[in-house]
Image (cartoon, rainbow, N blue to C red):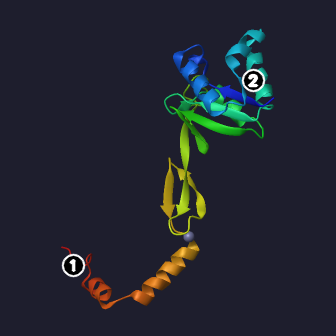
Amino acid sequence: MKLLYYAHSRLSYGTRKEKQELRLIKKRFPEYHIVNPNGITFMSLYEDGIMDECKSIVRQVQIIVASEYNKHIGRGVFEELSEKTKAKKYLLRNKEFIENFSVRTVDGNDWKIKYGKCEGMMKIVCAWCGKKLGEKEGEGIFHGICKKCKERVLREMDETEDLEAIIKFEHGDWGNRN
Ligand SMILES: [Zn+2]
């Protein structure tokens, strides 16, 4: 059975947000059985046991969807995300599933929602050839230029360099300001 773990703050257990997110997850991953820690709570007598149980489940799933709350996650969700697992991890922000993200610790003791701030990571892509250059904080795609394309563009610029460009440079659009 394909399993998906829905990591979310205990504050959202039983809320409308939880219901909406479960619906979104079902729609996006219809072939997965969703494990909701909201139901596991009843199986544990002691608070400490809940986290251990969740973590052991996290290690067995193929997908972890972490729900964020005002761009933050609590320590519980953070620990679940940090478990050593091969599961693919998604951050559920509003109605979007973000694949690349990082978490910056804000308050290491906060179990509710302020443990860490989530940052979407955006892909840096060469605008000329489309090569993936890396990632940086943010969302969407950031365009840059790779080494190869930069060399080529500079070479082409040298070849087509015309008089007009040289004159412009010499008069200095930047140089004659008071
Ligand atoms: Zn390129």
Compared with 1, 174 (above or below) is below
Mark 1 vs 2: CB contact within 8 A? no
The dot on residue 176 is 1
Density class for disc 1 (Cα within 10 Å; few <14, some 14-19, many ≥20) is: few
Compared with 58, 104 (above or below) is below
Distance of mark 1 from mark 2, alpha carbons?
66 Å
Instruction: Give how far across and how far down residue 70 sits, in percent.
Output: 49, 30
Callout 2: CB less than 8 Å from ligand 1: no
Query: In the rendered structure, which amino acid carries the disc numbered 1?
Result: Asn
Q: Earlier in the sequence, mark 1 or mark 2?
A: 2
In the image, 171: left or right of 144?
left
In the image, 28: left or right of 43?
left
Q: Residue at x 52, y 16 (%)?
A: 16
Density class for disc 2 (Cα within 10 Å; few <14, some 14-19, many ≥20) is: many
Query: In the rendered structure, which amino acid carries the disc numbered 2?
Result: Cys
Quarter containing the C terminus: bottom left
Quarter containing the N terminus: top right
Q: In this figure, which residue is indicated by the disc labeled 2?
A: 54
Q: Residue at x 73, y 9 (%)?
A: 42
Instruction: Give how far across and how far down residue 32 sits, in percent.
Output: 72, 29
In the image, 118: left or right of 171?
right
Instruction: Give how far across and how far down residue 65 sits, in percent.
Output: 65, 32
The dot on residue 34 is none
Q: Secondary structure at mark 2?
A: helix
Quarter of the figure with residue 111: top right
Instruction: Give how far across and how far down residue 88 sits, in percent.
Output: 71, 40
Q: Secondary structure at mark 1?
A: loop
Compared with 114, 42 (above or below) is above
Q: Nearer the viewer, mark 1 or mark 2?
A: 2
